[in-house]
Image (spheres, rainbow, N blue to C red):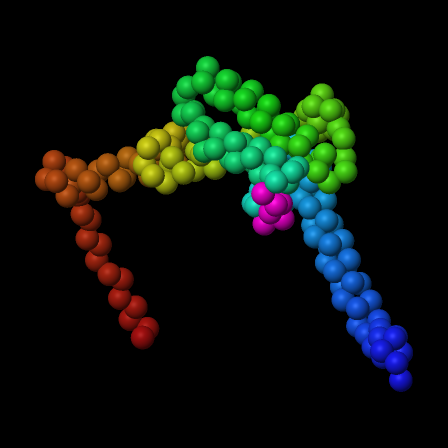
Amino acid sequence: MEIRDWIMTIAVLLAPLVALQVQKLIEAWKEKRQRKRWVYLTLMTTRHVQLSLEHVRALNMIDLEFTKTSGKEAEVRTSWKTYLDHLASVPKDDDQPGMAVWAQRKLELFTQLLTTMGQCVGYDFDPVHIQKGIYAPRGHADDEMEQRATRRLLLELLAGNRPLKMHASLVPLDENAAAEGRKFLKALQIIQEAYEGKHVLRVTIEKPVIDDSV
């Protein structure tokens, strides 16, 4: 058998193994690309509810899925780091002007992140579409704001930083109930005065009736 025949025989034997390895590499590449698309699509579909768990999870997966140090993936990582640094610099609640400036800058950085990520995974949406091309019911925004305000109020109450205002009033059901209530309060007042020595209670001792038939 000539060398060429040996080479052909080895090639025939190794062909299935090579094909299998190539198939695995292709599947791994497709799976990784699908995970990148999932991150992008999740951020796009939840960009109006950025406090949702899905949105936060997708943000935290950027470093895990966009790992290349060059090209579009590197641009995605840079945009994410800039956006993350801005999220960590939120001003205090009582700084309304600073909060307005911060919110506007947050929108710009988030839009840049989605634009760069979209170009990386095959989507090309302009910044105007990213910011405004979405249906977001006003009720969802109101619910989110109310939930945040309620949580903040409860935390302040539990921490003792906010008093709890209460107003109680006794409303009698009718005049008879009101009169009975006044009698009861008067009796309590007399008992208290007697206990303090300010009032003398009159005690009447009645002679017991003896039944002679027993």
In this view, the residue farthest toward the bottom is: 1
Q: Residue at x 68, y 30 (%)?
A: 115
Is there any visible trace of residue 98 in the rendered image? yes
The span picked out in magenta is 64-69
Residue 47: which quarter of the image? Answer: top right
Q: Position of residue 111 (x, y in %)?
A: 64, 27
From the image, give the main secondary structure of the stretch colored magenta. Answer: loop
Q: Of 75 and 63, which appears nearest the observer?
A: 75
Count all numbered tags in the image, as a single digit: 0
**Image quadrant of residue 139?**
top right
Name the residue nearer the viewer: 10 or 154: 10
User: Seen from this angle, which residue lies furthest top?
Assistant: 97
Taking the view exactly as shown, the residue that stands out farthest to the front is 2
Side (left or right) of 9 relative to 105:
right
Q: In the depicted view, which residue is nearer to us: 139 or 9?
A: 9
* Magenta span includes 43: no
